Image (cartoon, grey):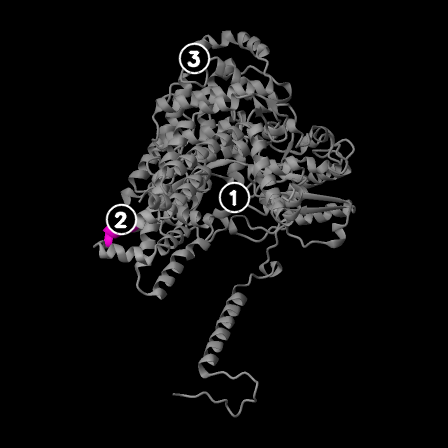
Amino acid sequence: MPRSRLEDATRHLGCYGLLAPTFVLVGVFSLIPFVWAFTTSFYRYEIGGDPTFVGLSNYGEYLSDPTLGISFRNLAFLTAFSVIVSVVFPLGVAKLIFSLSSARARYIYRIVFLVPIVVPGVATLMIWGGMIYGDNGLVNESLRLLGLEHLARGWLSSPETVLWAVAFIGFPFAGGINILIYYAGLAAIPESVHEAAQLDGASGLGKFFRIDLPLVLSQIKLLVILTVIGAVQGFQGMFILTRGGPGFESMVPGLWMYFNAFSFQRMGYACAMGVILFLIILVLTVLNLKYFKSAEDVKAAT
Amino acid sequence: MVEYAPRADVPRGAADFSRGTRLVKAKYILLVAIVAGCVWALWPPSQQEAGIQQGGRPEDPVKAARPYQIRMAPALYLPGTMPQNVGEPLKGLVRVAERFEELYPDTYVRFVGTPGVREWLVTQLSAGLAPDILNVNVEDVWQDVHKGWYVPLDEYLDRPNPFVPAGQPGSRQWWDLFKYQAITRGKAAPDGKSYCISFDMVETGIFYNKDIFERLSLAPPKDWVEFDRLQTTLREAGYIPTLASLVAASDWGVDLVFDQLYYPILPGIDLKKDPAREAYLEGYLDWDEICFLYRKGFFTRRDPRWVEMWRILKDWRRHWNQDIATADMMRLFITQKGAMYWSASWDVNRLTRDPDVPFRWGVFYPPPIPPQYDAYADGHPMCVIGGAAMQYVVTNTAFSDTGDPATSERLKRAVAFLQFLTLPENAGPVISEVLSMLPNVRGVEPHEELRPFDEILRRRYTTTKWSYTFDMRFNEVFIRMFDLYLNGGIDDDAYLDWSDRNLDFAVETTVRRKNVDFAELERAWEALAPLRRNMKGLPDAAK
């Protein structure tokens, strides 16, 4: 006799109980704020003031916001730059470490490249802003030492250089967790595949592009998604270093949303911007999942 | 093959270590000892040993049990801190609080530091958790007055300060205790109420290196033409002529040049005569007048004075340091790379007390723009654009005991503390602990080093303060685009486009939020038409 649904539910009550706190926390801290933000985006609302229903006018206003064009242009540049450097450089470093013959050397290099992640991101930004790009920072002092004083400048305050200066923060982009993700991907490739490739005459770069790269596509896909989400949502770097300036030359939508919410107290408008950013991330993630092949897709195709 | 045999001197069952194991153990012990030594060496001294204690007084459990707890965030005068890292930790306010607590044994005054950012302010005020007394810039207050976060102080200012002896300034009205009346009363919000006490004043000026000036046989300039020539000479001698920041340019620079060009036509455009404020503010253009005039074509690309104002500032920019946003101007001045430093009285503290300042310095005020430099200027002296430094407001926390300002005992004590603080014998020692600000209390003289700023502050007040006129969005966009303009990121045309769009938005928002009625201003505008008839350079719509 089949068990009733009630019996099933009772039998799994313990599991539901264990999952419940997670669902409650996700609901309270993620889903409810999202619903609240979506609702607020239809109101003109200041903290401490009374909300007024304005329908879609916040969305309409954003379409004519003077920062819209430049902030999305900056966002596209920085996202593309981040995706490229977060895919290319860590993969190269991971491959080099993986190719070392000594297990001890591999371990030490992994540690060396991982250690910088313990430095808080804000501290890293302050170091770049003050010690590297500052008036008397590494870049300007090096230029002066080389007799190129005329090239010294406020790298973060000059409209010509600010975006590149921000993009290059983290150079040479070889630290952090991305290397470990790639390393795990490379380590997961069966030895038999390498041996078969060698028998077929593949070696060096050829082997890397034909064997390693297709088999770490899952890792690349994951990192692309994480990097895009991080780039679209993130604005802390701009906030700390440039506040989006000079002018709006390094403004990104997330930072303008922040200013509108907490400086100008235009909560409804900021919520509308947040909803638009959410939709952009959603579309990019879906496109990535749909059209970017993973290692499993490659294996299935072959 | 070596066989293991238990050592004879070790009892059976006890641990036995080989030499290698002992070495490893010794290594760990040494490591722990080094770490412990480092921790001991780097352990911060106790607050008393360091001589610094945030808030300046240890927590007193007896006083902490008193029914009325007042928290004050005094900003610059926070006891225990050392402004600009020179001098001794501040104690002045603690002494005032102790004397006040003797008068009010049911009250305890604490001093706290605050982040000083708007995000913090908004969240604390909306939650009713802000300190009872707080230093807030007036433009922040004006934006939020309708939310009930701040207590209007007019009823207290209009009445006697109860701590002032009869016959002394302040015994009739608390207002009378303040020295710089124009600026103090000018802090009234657009709703006509005063929400802050201007405790002290800051004024701007140009610090100059007297040694460099003497070497090059230079003297402070008498007008803008001389000023321009002076800066050219300094540049040719290898110095940065003027060290200036974006903040100085966007706030002070705009107001100064605006006054130079618009003061001559002020009789034709000053539409509102507020009897309460006119005596002090002499034709100050308020936000509603600015909105009205904007709709008449002023402050747009169709207004020749407006266009000229930006040109003058851009022209001055060529004499400044390259990086106006992030460069350490004080460092460039002290290391004598820059000959002049456009700053404010707050830097007197550092220049006076820092032993590393190796030269003599003086202060002068930007000179007037004569008609031969600009056709719209008449050469009148530059106005005052500085103003209140510490602006103490009383927040909604102060009446949280009853929720009603009319019945709150805590609020009475918070206001009483401010009244007590503004007595000359209390304000003087507090303000003079830091050589930065000028006392705004009658009977308290500024320090000798600050006297030049005191003289500057006696000038006529500015025609308007652009940074107080609109909301924070306007200021944010304006400063950003002005920065870009000064640094060559956009040309004159593009900048004026941005300026027009920004003002469009700001005026529209202001008119909507504050329900501006232009009818009365329109009548005043018509009445002033004969005066405008002979004025040159007005926008077409204003003729």
Between discs 3 and 1, the one toward the N terminus:
1
Residue where numbered disc 3 is placed: B539
Secondary structure beneath disc 3?
loop
Report whether B14 appears left or right of A194: right
Picture coordinates of residue A234, whole percent (x, y): 46, 40
Q: Residue furthest bottom?
A: B8
Chain part drawn in magenta:
A204-211
Residue type (three-letter) at the residue carrying disc 1? Glu
B89 falls in the magenta region? no
Q: Mark 3 or mark 1, which is nearer to you?
A: 3
Among the 4 quarters of the image, the one containing residue A238: top left
Q: CA distance from mark 3 to mark 1?
A: 45 Å
The quadrant the C terminus of chain B occupies is: top left
Residue where numbered disc 2 is placed: A210
Among the 4 quarters of the image, the one containing residue A162: top left
Q: What's the mark number on residue B449?
A: 1
Residue type (three-letter) at the residue carrying disc 3? Pro
Compared to residue B413, the image places residue A192 above or below, namely below
